[in-house]
Image (cartoon, helix red, strand yellow):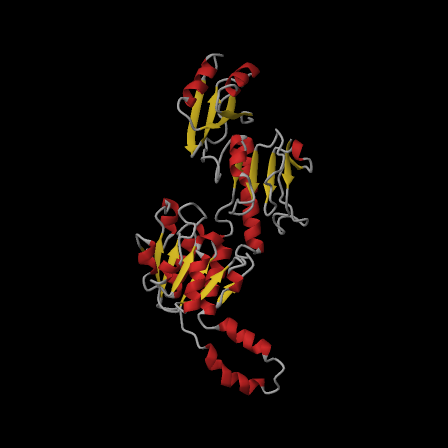
Amino acid sequence: MRYVKVMDNIAKRITRDGEAELGEGYQKTDDISQADAILVRASDIHGIDFGPSVRCVARSGAGVNNIPLEECAKRGIVVFNSPGGNSNAVKELVVGMILVNSRGTAGGIDWVRSNAGDPDIVRASERSKKAFVGHEAIGRKAGVVGLGAVGSKVANALINLGLDVYGYDPYLSVEHAWQLSREVKRVDSLEELCQGADYVTLHVPSKEDTVHMLGEEQVSLMADGAMLLNYARADIVDEDGVARSLESGKLGCFVCDFATPKTTRMPRTLITPHMGACTDEAEENCARMAVGEMKAYLEDGTIRNSVNYPDCDMGPCQGQGRFAALHANVPNMIGQLTAALAGTGTNIQRMSNASQGAHAYTLVDTDSPLDRQTYDRLRAIPGVYRIRVIRPAQA
């Protein structure tokens, strides 16, 4: 039996009590010291005492700033997220914002609310509607920054609506390149994408090279009165630069999902309360993905969509034994691991090794189960964080 600590009600529609179904061989526990895995959505688990038994943390959603990634990596705890599970939800909201707010719809709705008590509101509406004249989106230039799970869907949807779509993503994966419409024009720089754009929408993670990637300089290249949308991460934009662009009138509207102290004071903003992924379907997709990643790792040592370790998939164990080594990415580690096995007469049948930054993962199938002596020799190697013994597949 494997035990799972569920930190949040990670999906309302999976079970009536909002918790994910874990399946046979798994049981929820409130005792984190007993848990083999942690499922989390919104809870901040920085500072938590994981205990020696926790092997992985699975996040229902894409963002992982509520999880201590480096601490987990050095303790041999693999952290998963669920990218793409909420991509359709974000796509629909972004495309809707572009279409609705190009027409001045939000201002018109506010006018009706504020004049609801006017007995002559019908005629007043006719007189006032000219204040909310907008423009149609079809045929206008839209720039999509980041063509991953969300950005590729946004770009394709805008193409289907008849916009002239440009995309910028220097790290575009083969998978998402295949999913992208051939009508999306790829450019080699953010500046080229922004040049004359009526809409620019951001869909990149927060990393060292993306923080404040779009500010006043990039907005200055866009069409006068353009719309900027940020449904990625708050720090992707330089808020001070965007504020100046709004105040000068160069930027017509800033639409974002992040109600920060600065954005809420900016003129001509439309801010949603971090609700881009808030649909029943997205929550269910992310929860199921997180549970699947957790189970694949606990049962076979398979890593998919980890944010602190590399992907690794050798399928079910075909030998008599399988173990995983979670270790520092340092020279001669493989040599030390194989030497430790050779010293106890253990033969390697299959092995996979990969690294991600400072950390690495080695999965090994052997012709005999790992005994205590071999385990101790492996664990004693400097730089090894954890040795996980994974039972062979059952016949």
| 180 vs 46, nearest the viewer | 46
Q: Can the viewer see residue 183?
A: no
| 179 vs 32, nearest the viewer | 32
Q: Residue at x 51, y 33 (%)?
A: 73
| 209 vs 30, nearest the viewer | 209
Residue 102 pos. (x, y %): 44, 70
Left or right: 57, with 308 as reference point: right
In which quadrant will I find the C terminus?
A: top right
For the image shown, how many numbered marks are present on the structure?
0
Above or below, 297 against 203 in this view is above
Above or below, 25 against 351 in this view is below
Above or below, 199 against 375 in this view is below
Left or right: 196, with 327 as reference point: left
Above or below, 27 against 347 in this view is below
Left or right: 244, with 170 as reference point: right
Residue 46 pos. (x, y %): 59, 40
Quarter of the image for residue 331 reads top left
Residue 265 pos. (x, y %): 52, 64
Q: Residue at x 49, y 35 (%)?
A: 303
Left or right: 189, with 390 as reference point: left
Q: Residue at x 51, y 45 (%)?
A: 82
Residue 92 pos. (x, y %): 48, 60
In which quadrant will I find the N terminus?
A: top right
